[in-house]
Amino acid sequence: MKKTKIITGLLVTLLLTLALALPAVAQVEPPVVKADLAPGESMTVIKEVTTSAIPPNPDIYFMCDTTASMGPIIEAMKANAGAIMAQILAVQPSAQFGVGNYKDFPYDPYAFQHQQAITADTVAVSAAIAAWAASGGYDWPEGQFYALDRLADGTGIGWREIGTEIVVWLGDAPAHDPVPNAATGLGYDITEATVTADLVAAGIKVIAISWDSGDPSPYRLGLDDDPNVLGGDYAAFYGIVEDGTPGQASRIAAATGGAYLFAATPQEAVEAILDGIEQLTTDVWWEVVECDPGLTVELEPAVYYDVPGDTTVQFAEYITVAEDAPQCETLTATVIFYANEYPEEGVVIGEQQISIHVVDITPPEVWCIESVNPHGKTVPPAGKTTLPGPKGGQNEDGFYQLLAEDNCDPEPEIYVSYIGADPMLLFGPFDSGIVVKITEDPEASPFCKKMGSSKGQAGAVAYHIRLPSDPVIYAVDASGNMNRCQCLVPPPPK
C-alpha cells in the first residue's frame, strides 16, 4: 500500500494504490461434478464456496457531514473518490454509487441534500462529491438522523432491487436526538431507535467513519460523542428536550450489520472506506434448478449467515439416482449459489453443473435358436430326428443362430463355452445373429474353426465349434453385465 500525502493548509491529497489482493468474484469448488451412478446409488460431494472481498452487487452511497469542521475530510474525498470507486469496481464490477451530504436544522440551508442517485456513472458521482463545501453547523450535534431516515425511506435514492445497500457515513459529530417533526415536517420525530429500525428494515448496512477533527476540544469521539454536550439549537428553536446518548454510530453500524471505524486523520478516513466495506458480511445459500427427473440433489446446511468477505464455507451435497432412473442416460442438474440477505435478495455468486451417467445394470438377453445349414437350407426340427430315443435330440445337425439383445448396448458380444469347462474356455466374441455349427464329442478336444467351401459358396454358417458337453452361450454388454443360456446338442451317432 503506497500513499503520497501533500498538505497545503486544509488540502489533503492522497494518491492511493489500495490493492485488494482478494478474489474479485465468489468461487465455487468443484464447479462441475461428473460421475457414474447406478439406479438407487448416492454420492456425497463437499462443496466449497468462497465469498468475494466485497458483498455482491453493492450500491454504495457516500454521505458526508459538510459542516465547517469537515473541510479536510471533504478535500480528501474530492481527491480520492475516483480511486476509491476504481478499487471497489476492480473487485465488484457491478458496483454502483450515490452521493449526498448533510448539515443541520434549523439555520443551515438544508439538513440533507441528496445529490446523486445510485448510478454506474463514476464521473457523475465524482462531480457530486466535488460539489461538497464545508460550511455552517452552528452547535456541535448535526442532523444526520434525518439524512439516514431519508436513505432508509429510499425515495429517489435509486437503490437497486437486488443488491447490497451500503451507506458510507463520514462525520465528526454526533446526531441530535430526537429530530422533531417540527423540523422535518414528516409527521413523526426521528430518534436513534426509529432510524435504526428503518435502516434494518430496508436492509441497509451502515459503515460509520468517525473522524477526530479536534473541534471542539476535549470532545474527540466524533460520531460517537455525547450529543447532549455543546448542543442547544433544537431546544432553543423547537422547545424540545434532547435525550440522545454517546455511541450512536457504533450502535447503528452494529445493528445494521455494518462497521464502525475511527480515523485520526483524513488519510485514515479515506482508507477506512475500503476497510469498512471489506468488513461487511453476507448470507450464503443455494438453490437447485433444472434438475432432471430421476435425479435428486440436496445440500446442507440451507444457509450460512453473516459470512465475512474472502471466507470459504462448506456445503455437503447429496446426489441420488432414483431406483427407476433410465439406465444409460445422463441426468443433469444445476446448483446456484447466492449471497446477500437470505432468502429474498439473493445475488448469484456461483454455479455448479452436475452430470450423472446412470450406469447400465441390466444384463443382456441371450438365446440360441435352430438355424439353417451352410447352404441356407432348413434342417429337420428337434424331435423329428433318427437319433436313439422316442423324440431324438435337439437339432442333431447342430446348426444354431446365436442372438443377444441389450437395453443399452446395441452390439453385445457373444461367447461360447460348455458345461463343466475348467478352466473356463471361451470362444468368441461373436456378433449377435451369427450362425454356427455346434457338435458335441466328449472324447475330443474342443475347437472353433471357420466354415465355408473352396468355391466361396455354402457360407450361411460361419464357424464350426466342437465341445465336450452341451454349450453355454454368454452375452456381455459394454457395461460388463453378463447373462447366459444353454443349448442342447446331441453327441455324434454311434
Image (cartoon, rainbow, N blue to C red):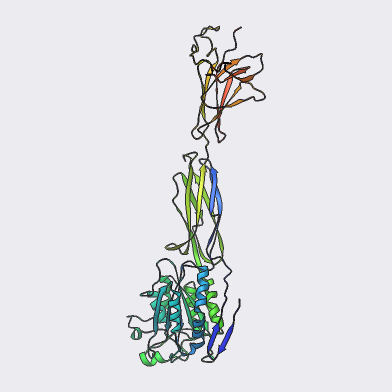
> In the figure, residue 136 lies in which quadrant?
bottom left
Q: Nearer the viewer, residue 392 or 185?
A: 392
Q: How many marks?
A: 0
Question: Residue 250 location, x and y as percent?
Answer: 50, 78
Q: Is residue 212 visible?
A: no
Question: Residue 148 location, x and y as percent?
Answer: 42, 78
Q: Is residue 463 visible?
A: yes
Question: Residue 165 location, x and y as percent?
Answer: 44, 71
Q: Residue at x 35, y 86 (%)?
A: 183
Question: Residue 75 location, x and y as percent?
Answer: 50, 85
Q: Nearer the viewer, residue 295 or 198?
A: 295
Quarter of the image where the N terminus is located:
bottom right
Q: Residue at x 51, y 47 (%)?
A: 355
Q: Residue at x 66, y 23 (%)?
A: 422
Quarter of the image where the C terminus is located:
top right
158 vs 406: above or below = below
137 vs 308: above or below = below
Q: Nearer the viewer, residue 405 or 436?
A: 436
Q: Residue at x 55, y 15 (%)?
A: 398
276 vs 10: above or below = above
